[in-house]
Amino acid sequence: MALRSLYLPTAARPLYLFTYRSTATVHTSAFPRALALMDARYLRWLARLDGAAATITRDRLNDTFQNALARAGLRAHWLRTYWYTDVDDQAVVDDQCLRLVPAADDDGHALVRQMASDLQTLAAAGRIDIVLMASDDDRLSAPIEAAKMAGLTVCLLADERAESMPRLMQQDPSWARLLREADRRVVMRSSDLAQAMGPESELGSQPAAPRDEDQEAALQGVVNAWWETLPDEERASLREELPALRGVPPEVDRELLLRGKNALHRSLNFHEKRALREHARRVAMP
């Protein structure tokens, strides 16, 4: 009789047949699912903490990124954050995964390969709707385009400079090109990001970061001085070689980094190295 009752009209079924509900539907969300792929070195630079002694904390980052998406018009159910770094901070943070890359990855190749692989996996699985990425490496342009074609909404995190794209195209064309690939540019002020990544007591003790204009002028001066010392035959040889390269030849790279270190009286950060190479390419191939 119980078996036959399954085929009775709804109104005629016994009440106990409606008391069971699959738990698979209990935790579903009305919002799209989102996660983040974050390059720690890029975030430090974005927050003006690159090269600083401040301890980076990750505890508030999930809420920070979720709120940033909401301000950009994308309310989402946050799943997790992937944190790409060459330093294991030994932290255990809920809904965050550490992705260690080689410490000697100066050109960022290993990091780009890992981020691209993770992005491809997410797109293939079809379980995520929105990916917020933090990187300024334009080698991610093709993986981002492939993820968009697979149906993902890809957003890129940037600071106030992204609000003036024509100017950014002049100052940092490779970063600007990457930002233009995104469905949306999620803009956060550097001070807000710095506050989310470290205790105020530590952040307040850090020296003020140099203005972008001064830094760009210093790097441009380094490249100009290097170019003026090159013999004509070396200039001609470099002009022939550069179109086939993404950056600059290794021997040129070493000389420029040494000159940059001497000019700024410190080691260059990841972004400054890339900017130096961009300036060198523009001078050699006007």
Image (cartoon, rainbow, N blue to C red):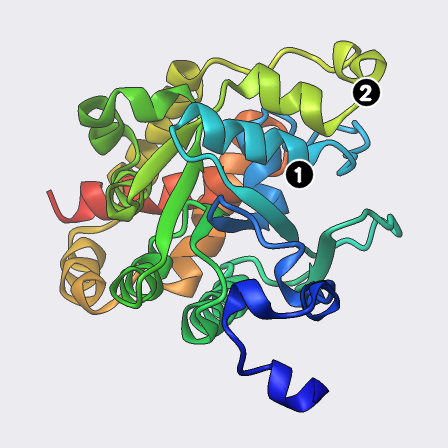
Q: Secondary structure at mark 1?
A: helix
Q: Nearer the viewer, residue 94 or 115?
A: 94
Q: Quadrant of residue 136?
A: top left
- Residue designated by label 2: 199
Locate the N terminus and report the quarter of the image it occupies. Answer: bottom right
Q: Nearer the viewer, residue 63 or 143?
A: 63
- Reading the chain from its start, which is encountered first: label 1 or label 2? 1
Count neighbours of disc 1 (C-alpha within 10 A) and say few if under 14, some if 14 to 19, many if 20 or more: many
Q: Horizontal placement of 72 versus 50: left or right?
A: left
Q: Is residue 268 visible?
A: no
Marks 1 & 2, CB-CB < 8 Å contact = no
Q: Position of residue 217 (x, y in %)?
A: 36, 21
Residue located at (79% from left, 34% from top):
57
Q: Is residue 166 visible?
A: yes
Amino acid at dot 1: Asn
Q: CA distance from mark 1 to mark 2?
A: 16 Å
Q: Position of residue 284 (x, y in %)?
A: 19, 47
Q: Position of residue 90 (x, y in %)?
A: 89, 52
Q: Horizontal placement of 144 versus 204: left or right?
A: left
Foreground disc of the pair 1, 2: 1
Locate the C terminus and report the quarter of the image it occupies. Answer: top left
Q: Quadrant of residue 105?
A: bottom right
Residue located at (66% from left, 64% from top):
101
Q: Secondary structure at mark 2?
A: loop
Amino acid at dot 2: Pro
- Residue designated by label 1: 62
